[in-house]
Image (tube, rainbow, N blue to C red):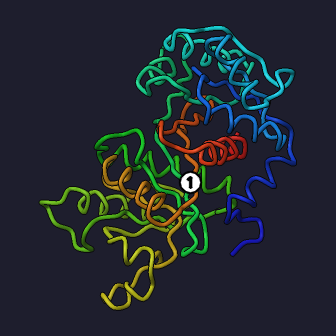
Amino acid sequence: MSEDRITTFDQLLSIVKGRERKRLAIAAAEGEEIIEAVKQAVEEGIISPLLVGDQAKLTELCGKKNLDLTEVEIVHAPDPTLAAKAAVEAVKQGKAEMLMKGKVNTSTLLKAVLDKESGLRTGAFLSHVAVIEVESYPKLMLVTDGGMNIRPDIKQKAEIIDNAVEVAKRLGVERPKVSCLAAVELVNPDMQETVDAAGLVKMAERGDIKDVIMDGPIAFDAAINREAARTKGIISPVAGDSDIFLVPDIASGNIFVKSLIYLAGAKVGGLVVGAGAPIVLLSRSDSAQTKLYSIALGAKIT
């Protein structure tokens, strides 16, 4: 494994806190877990925050969490829709380099991001990448897309893989191993994810998807464990050593990641990539630690 490869969130934090602070705009930032994560990121020297929301509430929360007001800039926008627009505009104008979802609906934030006139469109496909650290696996796992695209087709899956590969490269993985997950290893016309997986592997072989080692369809046990693959008679370059796990749809990805968090104590960070800036897009139930890891991840790939 390359010495430059990031394999833990502690390692990621140590790298980003030694660099120039990134400017982070948070839409509707009035949340205790949000301010707690911001405080930690400020204290680690990772970000300079731009808090967009109700000024009185934000000032009160900063005081409650002992976040020094001299370290932050507050933009008064008490309405969540206006807060989303103002945060996106700050990134658009170069006043911030990263965007984060606060107490605003995902659809509202993404509407502002995708606005043709004032948004952060680049022409690239937007997708969510979850980065996971779990004790039983020796490196970070990138799971995509469990946070944005509901049922992507094969063309969209190719773009989702491209986005995840770029994140992997920023984490020091030059040629990531990609598992196209399914319930079985054989192509079954009644299981669209197996058909898509076979097509994606062929695309990679032809160079249409670049800088990857890919296999699929492959079940999760074989993708994560060499012995399981051996028992099933599977010979695969990704077996037991996958970096990127392409899930069939948003439901399977969401269940996958949350299962690891709540049952295996996994550490997780997540981003939407493909826009003009990394977007920290999290669940309302995510902890301050998960928010901090996501901010650090965004700072690394910015």
Q: How many marks?
A: 1
Vertical comparison of 194 with 80: above or below: below
- Where is residue 285 drawn, in percent x and y? 48, 41
Q: Residue at x 73, y 15 (%)?
A: 74
Q: Is residue 81 left or right of residue 196?
A: right
Nearest the camera: 212 or 1? 1
- Find residue 259 and report its image quarter: bottom left
Q: Residue at x 44, y 47 (%)?
A: 160
Look at label 1 and name its amino acid.
Val
Q: Quadrant of the N terminus?
A: bottom right
Q: Residue at x 31, y 40 (%)?
A: 150
Nearest the camera: 183 or 65? 65
Vertical comparison of 122 with 33: above or below: above
- Where is residue 255 drawn, in percent x and y? 35, 54
Furthest toward the left, the residue is: 190
What residue did someone put label 1 on?
268
Q: Is residue 54 left or right of residue 160?
A: right
Q: Quadrant of the C terminus?
A: top right
Q: Residue at x 52, y 38 (%)?
A: 272
Vertical comparison of 28 with 76: above or below: below
Furthest toward the front, the residue is: 64
- Where is residue 177 drawn, in percent x and y? 51, 67
Q: Is residue 236 left or right of residue 10?
A: left
Q: Could you tell me which secondary element the residue under label 1 belongs to?
A: strand
Nearest the camera: 57 or 167? 57
Q: Residues within 10 Å of mark 1 (few under 14, many from 20)?
A: many
Nearest the camera: 285 or 140? 285
- Where is residue 89 drawn, in percent x and y? 63, 14
